[in-house]
Image (cartoon, grey):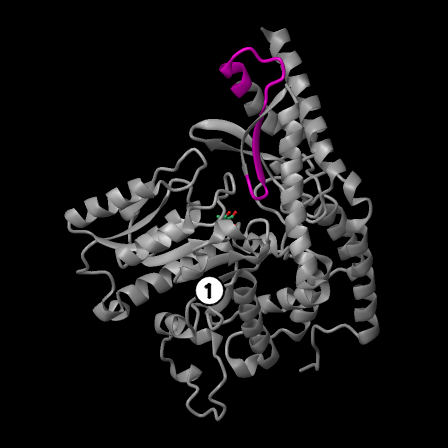
Amino acid sequence: MNNESLDLSLEEFEQLLGQSSKLVINQYQGLNEKKAYHDFTQAEVESWFDEPLPSDGKSNSELLEEVRKKVLATATNNLGPHMYGYVMSGGNQVSTVAELLATTINQNATKWHLAPAISEIEKRVIRWTTEMIGYAPDAGGVLVSGGSAANLTGLTVARNIFFEKKNIKQEGLFGQKPFVVYASDQVHSCVDKSVQILGIGLKHLRKIPTDDQFKIDTRALEEQINQDIKNDLTPFCLIGTAGTVNTGAIDNLSELARLAKKYEMWYHIDGAYGALASVLDSTKESYHGMAEADSIALDFHKWLYQPFEAGCTLVRDWSSLRRTYFSQAEYLDTALEEDSDRLEFNEHYFQLSRNAKAFKVWMSIKSYGFKKIKAMIQQDIDLTNYLIEQIQKLSDFEVKAYGLAVACFRYLGDCQSEEEITAVNQQLIPALEKDGRVFITSTKLKGELVLRACFINHRKTIETTDYLLSVIREVAETIRKLQITNC
Ligand SMILES: Cc1ncc(COP(=O)(O)O)c(C=O)c1O
């Protein structure tokens, strides 16, 4: 047997790191001028990777060159300021380094003794988060993959604690009277998925209508709760959204807290998109009632500018997490450990093996400081408002809705009818993707198609915002010319 390993010599490893650093720096070079999207066909991209399983390795220099050409140079430019689709925060440089350091030490953030410092860092990040958003200082929490996982986690805790007396961990849902989850019709689709996964069933998710600001209609909500009680169903969980994905709307969180209490429901808040904006003096007021939630879902790869993935679930106390997730296993027993203050994350979450998501969050908060991060969040909101003000001054665009860092609008140009407006805006999305200078997506508001621009990215400026409108106008005018010629 040879004494072989996968390791390079330290000199070779240093060289590989040096070459990789150059690639990283290159991604940042001329970021404002880089395209947001490269319009290759799916078949073409697939063809780049169409090769048999490599039996022998190739040189790392050649490999890095392949990576540069096929992956880095063609990547959708989530880093850059011209990304407006979905919620893509652009990451941050300190977290890039943190990811490298974290994978180097390869800690498993599960049992304390497998990752002592990382476990304590995760606890600290949870504590800082509660402090940032003004939640219960002793709240328990766990870092998860993102907003969807954070909501699923919050709702899992909700279900297991709410039905703890019925021994749900042992008995399952069998024999339970159906129970109902309430949220607005703007609730994120991950809640639909969670309700399915948790065995509650979509039939028991009530999507309550929203008002003209896309906030839950609390009167309709209470009527629905009473109707369900009359029908012998159990009101179980009320979900408030602190920043909807469509328009950034924040539900009336204090009224929801009151209703949750009145009807003895679990109160969960989906703050994946917007809860972190509550740190700003300018928006704080809209978040009254958030501190009363039993659980909150947050997403650090949105407004903490983390690279994917990093989400977080907070609950009022650590014991709710443990009562939900603890499961006895001989090979994980801590009975022989002497230090009883160790917090075992595997006992407080579903995953056993976990990477060190908290480390990049911790390093970047320490490096930039909370003041700077707050300023960036405010800047995103200010730029969104700037875009709205510009559109309001124009006759060829119209604002449809906006909130926090989301702006929904339409191109009007010289269109003469609703049909023409819808047609041009529909065609704009694929045409802009083909053009590639800016990346923007659409959504539907009360059935109407609109362009939706998300501004969560600390690299945007007034100039890049003006650029967005000028590119959309240019592409739309070309579409209009073609439409008119074809008529
Ligand atoms: C309000 C809201 N909830 C949940 C999610 C899902 O988060 P993730 O994409 O991190 O799973 C999003 C994503 O945009 C969101 O805006």
Tell me the residue that label 1 is attached to: 314
Is residue 327 shown left or right of residue 52?
left
Which of the two residues, 92 or 396, is positioned nearer the viewer here?
A: 396
Q: Residue 222 at what x, y percent from top left?
A: 27, 45
Q: Quadrant of the C terminus?
A: top right
Q: Residue 328 at what x, y percent from top left?
A: 36, 79
Which of the two residues, 153 or 272, is positioned nearer the viewer here?
A: 272
Answer with the quarter of the image where residue 414 lies: top right
SS at circle 1? strand
Q: Is residue 379 above or below residue 19?
A: above
Is residue 105 shown left or right of residue 108?
right
Q: Magenta part of the protein: which range?
A: 403-422
Q: Is residue 400 above or below residue 310?
A: above
Is residue 419 shown left or right of residue 73?
left
Q: Residue 20 at what x, y percent from top left?
A: 78, 60
Answer with the quarter of the image where residue 435 lies: top right
Answer with the quarter of the image where residue 153 lies: bottom left
Q: Residue 249 at what x, y percent from top left?
A: 48, 42
Residue 417 inside the magenta-drawn segment: yes
Q: Is residue 79 above or below residue 105?
A: above
Amino acid under label 1?
A: Leu
